[in-house]
Every structure is written in C-alpha cells, then in structure tokens.
Image (cartoon, grey):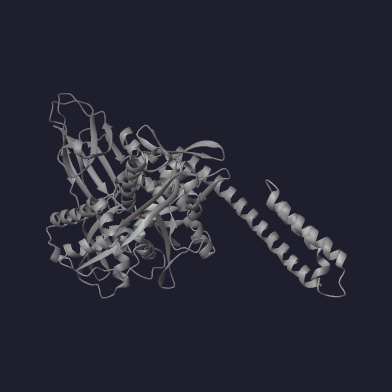
C-alpha cells in the first residue's frame, strides 16, 4: 500500500513519498516542488496551480487562492464582507457556510472550500501518479495543529472528493518536527519548539524528541494568521496611500486589487533579501501609475502587530506548559513566512539570541514529515517512528449558567477518552440538549460551538435524579466523538462533531466526486488535444527545415518543394485560426502531411 504525504497549504502545497529509504518531494508538471494552492475557472474550463496563478490578475473573480482559510468554517455576513474586499474572488454564504461564486465556461457555479481544496489535491495526486507511474489511492494530509474538529473533518471530505483515502490527518508542526528529527540524527532527548509561520496559519508546538519518539507537549496558534495577512496589510496600506494621493478608491476594482496583492506579495519576498524595493503598477486604475518605495523598517512597522502576536503565542504556550524559554533546546523554523529576517530576529531574541534551526527547507518540511509518517504506517515500513499528539483546545459541554464544563483539557495527549455524569434540571425532563464547545474560556459565548445533539426518551424522574453519562473520545487524528447515554433506560445518542451542522452530506460528497471526475475527464481530453497539436507543430517545423535544406540540392523537384511549403504554411494558418479543433483533427492533419511529405523523408 503506497501512501503519499500531502502538505495542503493555504498558499502552496507539496507532496512527498518515502522511496528507496529516503523522502522524495515530487515536482509538479512544471518541474516545481511546491504548487500554488490556487484554482481558476475560465471560458475553457478549470486551471490549477501555476496555470491558475498566472492568469489571476486578468480573472480575479474566478480565481480562488485561499480556500483553506474557509474550510470547515462558519461565518457571518460582516466577516464575509471584510474578507471579500481584500480577496477579489466572490464569497457568498449559504446558511453560515462560505462558498465561492464563480463563472466556469459561461455558467454560474458555487463551490465549497472543500471542493476547491479537493481540486488542489487532485492535482497533487496526479503529480504523484505521474512520478510513480501508477495510481495512488492513499494519503496522509497535514492540517494546522490549531485546526478545530470541523476544519479537520472538512479536510478529510476534500480528500474523499479528490478520490483519496485519507488514512490519517497529521498536525503540520508535528510533521515538520518528524522531518527535522529524522534528518538530524543528533537530535535526541531534546525539547524542540516548532515555529510554523506559513501562508495562512501560524502554529507553535513544543515536542520532546527521544529515540524516534515524538511527543507533543503543547500546541498553540492561530488559524487566521499568516503571510496572507501580511500581504493584506500592505494592500490596505497602499489603498490608503492611493486614496490620499490621487483621491481614488482602488478597492472597488477587483482587477486592481488582485494586481496590488500580487505586487505586494512580491515586494514582501524581496524585502527578505534586500533593504528596500519599489512596488510599481502602471495604470492601476483611471490611468494612475503606482510607484511606492518601501524599505524594511516601513514594512516591519506596517506588520508589527502580526509579528508580535506570534511571540505572544509562544509566551502563552510556554506558560501553559509551565516552561521557560531556556527549557527549549532547539527552535525549528517552518513555513515560508519564517524567511522574513525580522521574524527570525524577534524569535531568536525571545530565546536569548539562540541560533535558529534552518537546516530544513521551510516549504517542504511538512510534506517531508508526512511522507516519513506515511511510510511508517505502510505495509513495508523503513522507519518506525512513534507520534503522540495533543488536543489544541479544551473541549466540553455547556452546563447551567452558560459556562463550559471541560471534559478534556487543552494539550491532553490523544487518543483520549473521558466520561462524566450529568443530570436533568427539571422534574420529569425527558430530553436534554448536549452542546459541545471548544475553547479556552469559561463563558460559552467566547468559545466555539462544535455541534449539538438531543438525547430523548430519558426515563421520567425528579430533577437531578437521572444519570446521563457523557463520553468524549478523541481519536489519533484529533477527531471527536461525543456519546450521551441515559443510564436507567440505556438510550443513547452520539455526535461525530459537526456531522450534522457544517459538514457536507454524503449525497453532496458523491455529487462533488462526480463533478470532479467530469473535470478530470475534460482535462484529460484537453491534455491529449494539446499533445496532438504539439506533435503536429513539431512535424510541420521539421518539414519546413527539411524543405530549406533540400532546396539547396541540385537534383530536387523545386515545384514540389514549393507546393509543400504552401501546404505547411496553410497547416500553420489552419492551426492558428480554427476554432474548436479536436485531437482527432490534429491527428488527421498530421497523417495527411506525413503522406504528402513522404518523398522528403528519403
Ligand atoms: P507556506 O504556507 O509555508 O508555503 O508559506 C507561504 C507563505 O510564505 C506565503 O505567504 C509567501 O508569501 C511567504 N513567503 C515565501 N517566501 C517568502 C520570503 N522570501 N519572504 C517572505 N515571505 C515569504
């Protein structure tokens, strides 16, 4: 059973496989080791990865680049409005679930974040299949450690829609630590802090590594903090600048906003290597040419809150695990945003000017670890690493006074099972609602509702007499199952969190799988067509070169050569000016040419 390891990132994704006793990161069809997590829809169909990014500024409304930010989330209208301004693709709500509204081949469609993520997964799966020369079915997919239950479930759904059997979800920082720990054999009996600052999420995790055993001690982070937010801050800053200087609000134009975002991201990367750069966009809107010099101090000033909040998260997790900065033996940097020198500076300073571990490629570390873990659970493992992870947030039920009664504390090692007895509040009460929350606050309104369910047919009895047993079970992937049982009647009900609230139904998943297959078939037809066109063109240009060469021979039939020259020119014109040509049309044309040019081959 071959299992691939996938880092499904917010901005970039990466796929790896453990082969011949080492991990291989698999390059995509463009030869790149990471693929932009971007999907675009055009008149012709669907584009994924580089092809989608390359056309983004001309087609912003139909280009979706950060589906992971929305996967498994519920949103309200004001949150949605705020996000839409800075991300020009159209987000809409169906109930409280966000969807991307796009136009594909002239048809309006709504795609869920799971569906968009599934398209990226299909692309990564295909790269792996091309590389291995066989079908791939099984995958480990990584998720931010701070992803909640519904975000995890939704990621599994995305895998299923992509035709993958998701054998395991793995936390990103744990995965990176596995890669770091295995590739640096001197790391043993050490406490390692993984600072994972990527495109869309920030995770900080403390692990103990000893003898190939990776035990997560604590984890913290923010699923809405990453390089994307740095870009958004720069975009916001420039929108204000243009407004003040030219009196024009570019935020109303999605093409201008997409261009601005692309240039701001480029400038951000540039400022990791040089002290200053200039953001230039000719004719951004109404003939205004944007030229904005920016240096590192200004960049840091614009983003200082983001940078400092990552340090606050480190403080919080150290406090929570009763540790001091000096207890950390190594600090490992993971995620593209850790290339920012200021980030490295403040992290190093916080740990007493500690040298940071940068030996592992921050873009590939997570996929490397996932591939290593995939191998360790395969039928023929080359390594046998052991992982112990934790729940990122406390989980419990709502009780009287709208407070949370914690069943499992934050940072408890998983898998874990906890059982507590509850009772009724009024006489002859036959039903209770079990509201399941996660968070770190006492008050339920400051926590996140994971799901709710009813336990009915409780045997009638005075208040406080019935015994209702509630069991919380978190599996190895961090997915929670809650069961409630009325002890006297034996009646039971359970909830696999968010099954009934935010998750896709089985029918929805089946119809999405079908739609995905249709896209794949279309793409296969299109790829075959492109190949046929390429082969025809290669043949035409080969003949043209031969005609030029042969025209210098004295014994050649010049009229025949002239005739052939016209035929090849006509064929080029035919390729460039015909609509809706098929693979068969190209093949037919090539066969015709081969027949007519046969005498030249001699
Ligand atoms: P990841 O999720 O780890 O792939 O990280 C992607 C994020 O890293 C994106 O927001 C990128 O813009 C950012 N990034 C990549 N390279 C750099 C760099 N040299 N300087 C600053 N940010 C970068």
Residue 552 placement, left or right of 450: right
Q: Quadrant of residue 332?
A: bottom left
**Measured from the top left, where is residue 62 in percent x and y?**
48, 42
Residue 579: x and y, percent? 68, 46
Q: How many marks?
A: 0
Could you say which is closer to the camera, residue 194 or residue 451? Answer: 194
Can you name the residue that lies furthest to the top here?
428
Q: Quadrant of ligand 1?
A: bottom left
The foreground one among 479 and 598 is 598
Vertical comparison of 136 with 152: above or below: below
Any part of residue 272 in sight: yes
State the residue at coordinates (84%, 61%). Answer: 563
| Above or below: residue 407 compared with residue 376 | above
Q: How far across and how far down the image is residue 514, in percent?
A: 53, 43
The correct choice, above or below, for 573 with respect to 553 in the image is above
Quarter of the figure that contains the C terminus: bottom right
Q: Position of residue 321 (x, y in %)?
A: 14, 57
């Amino acid at each position: 059973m071959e299992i691939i390891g996938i880092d499904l990132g917010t901005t970039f994704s990466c796929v790896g496989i453990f082969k011949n006793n080492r991990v291989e990161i698999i390059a995509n069809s463009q030869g790149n080791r990471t693929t932009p997590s971007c999907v675009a829809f055009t008149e012709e169909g669907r584009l994924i990865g580089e092809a989608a990014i390359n056309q983004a500024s001309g087609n912003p409304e139909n280009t979706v680049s950060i589906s992971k930010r929305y996967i498994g989330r519920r949103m309200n209208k004001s949150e949605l409005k705020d996000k839409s301004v800075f991300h020009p693709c159209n987000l809409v709500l169906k109930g409280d679930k966000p969807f991307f509204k796009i136009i594909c081949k002239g048809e309006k469609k709504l795609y869920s974040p799971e569906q968009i993520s599934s398209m990226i997964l299909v692309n990564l799966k295909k790269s792996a299949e091309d590389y291995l020369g066989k079908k791939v079915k099984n995958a480990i997919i990584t998720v931010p450690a701070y992803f909640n239950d519904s975000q995890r479930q939704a990621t599994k759904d995305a895998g299923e829609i992509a035709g993958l059997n998701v054998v395991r979800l793995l936390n990103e920082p744990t995965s990176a630590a596995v890669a770091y720990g295995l590739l640096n054999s001197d790391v043993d009996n050490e406490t390692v802090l993984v600072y994972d600052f990527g495109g869309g999420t920030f995770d900080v995790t403390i692990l103990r590594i000893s003898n190939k055993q990776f035990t997560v001690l604590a984890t913290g982070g923010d699923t809405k903090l990453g390089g994307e937010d740095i870009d958004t801050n720069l975009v916001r800053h420039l929108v204000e600048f243009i407004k003040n200087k030219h009196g024009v609000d570019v935020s109303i134009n999605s093409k201008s906003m997409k261009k601005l975002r692309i240039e701001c991201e480029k400038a951000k990367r540039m400022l990791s290597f040089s002290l200053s750069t200039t953001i230039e966009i000719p004719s951004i809107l109404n003939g205004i040419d944007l030229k904005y010099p920016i240096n590192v101090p200004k960049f840091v000033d614009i983003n200082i809150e983001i940078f400092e909040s990552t340090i606050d998260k480190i403080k919080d997790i150290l406090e929570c695990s009763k540790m001091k900065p000096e207890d950390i033996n190594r600090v490992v940097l993971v995620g593209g945003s850790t290339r920012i020198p200021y980030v490295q500076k403040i992290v190093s300073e916080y740990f007493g000017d500690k040298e940071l571990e940068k030996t592992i490629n921050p873009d590939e570390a997570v996929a490397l670890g996932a591939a290593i873990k995939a191998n360790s659970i395969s039928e023929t493992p080359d390594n046998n690493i052991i992982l112990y992870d934790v729940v990122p947030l406390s989980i419990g039920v709502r009780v009287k006074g709208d407070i949370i009664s914690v069943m499992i504390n934050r940072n408890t090692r998983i898998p874990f099972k906890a059982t507590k007895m509850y009772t009724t509040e009024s006489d002859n009460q036959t039903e209770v609602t079990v509201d399941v929350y996660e968070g770190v606050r006492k008050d339920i309104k400051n926590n996140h509702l994971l799901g709710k369910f009813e336990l009915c047919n409780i045997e009638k009895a005075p208040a406080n007499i019935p015994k209702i047993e509630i069991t919380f079970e978190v599996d190895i992937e961090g997915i929670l199952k809650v069961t409630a049982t009325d002890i006297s009647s034996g009646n039971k009900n359970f909830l696999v969190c968010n099954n009934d609230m935010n998750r896709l139904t089985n029918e929805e998943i089946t119809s999405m799988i079908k739609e995905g297959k249709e896209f794949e078939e279309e793409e296969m037809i299109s790829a075959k067509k492109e190949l046929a066109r390429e082969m025809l063109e290669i043949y035409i240009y080969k003949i043209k070169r031969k005609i030029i060469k042969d025209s210098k021979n004295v014994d050649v039939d010049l009229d025949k050569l002239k005739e052939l020259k016209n035929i090849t020119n006509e064929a080029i014109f035919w390729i460039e000016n015909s609509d809706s040509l098929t693979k068969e049309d190209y093949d037919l044309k090539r066969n015709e040419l081969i027949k007519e040019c046969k005498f030249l081959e001699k």
